[in-house]
Image (cartoon, rainbow, N blue to C red):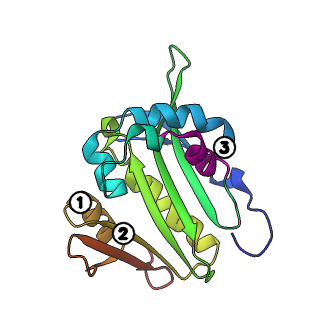
Amino acid sequence: MSGTAKIDLSRYASQWRMRNGLDVIVRPICPEDEPLMVKFHQTLSDRTVYFRYFSSLSLRSRVAHERLARICFVDQEREFVLVAEHQDAQSGDRKILAVGRLNKLENGQEAEIAILVADEVQKRGLGREILRRLIQIARDERLVRVYGELIRDNFAIQKLLREFGFRCRLLKDPGFIRATLDLFQNRF
């Protein structure tokens, strides 16, 4: 994300244990994740989709190959995407449980942040961990600020963002909030 140098993606991959004891690997997304992303989107409730996309974006739209290809084939100069993957010990089946994205703005100083966690593992610390890592990546990339836009009624994510030092303010449309974190003023 900085200059023209490629990011060493491997340094952002590691195992992490959720509050319920489930182990996941948090790692950068890769092109081979597209089928796992389809399955991930199939698990999301209408409420979770609405809170993330601000509308009831259809499953068909969310899993369209063109859309998922853009997500899974990351332009490292402009964005960074983490996934949390769990592999079942018995079957060996893998599934994505969360996705976090950091999109660098054209000014090179700021990035938009977004997180999506599967309903089955919400409120177990996974969103917090993805957010923590995305903020660290933004700091490593020497960004000045990150922000996210969210629906005003999404109180859980507002609380989480405030715990990390984000300032929340209403947008012109009072149904939406912008949460902003100045990276070098706030240390957690």
Q: Residue at the spot x=35%, y=38% of the render?
A: 44
Helix, strand or loop for disc 1: loop
Are there few (<14), some (14-19), or many (20+) residues within 10 Å of tag 2?
many
**Which residue, given by chain and number where applicable, does mark 2 sit on?**
149
Task: Establish if 11 lies above or below 109.
Answer: above
Q: Earlier in the sequence, mark 2 or mark 3?
A: 3
Q: Position of residue 15 (x, y in %)?
A: 55, 41
Residue 178 or 14: which is nearer the viewer?
Answer: 178
Q: Is residue 130 visible?
A: yes
Residue type beneath disc 1 = Asn
Q: Residue at the spot x=80%, y=68% of the render?
A: 5
Q: Residue at the spot x=49%, y=54% of the render?
A: 100
Residue 107 or 20: which is nearer the viewer?
Answer: 107
Q: Earlier in the sequence, mark 2 or mark 1?
A: 2
Task: Establish if 89 lies above or below 133.
Answer: above
Residue type beneath disc 3 = Cys
Q: Which residues are magenta?
A: 63-73
Mark 1 and mark 3 in contact? Answer it, CB < 8 Å: no
Q: Position of residue 158 (x, y in %)?
A: 27, 66
Q: CA distance from mark 2 to mark 3?
A: 25 Å
Are there few (<14), some (14-19), or many (20+) residues within 10 Å of tag 1?
some
**Which residue, given by chain and number where applicable, does mark 3 sit on?**
30
Mark 2 and mark 3 in contact? Answer it, CB < 8 Å: no
Q: Position of residue 146 (x, y in %)?
A: 48, 75
Residue type beneath disc 2 = Glu
Q: Is residue 13 visible?
A: no
Helix, strand or loop for disc 2: strand
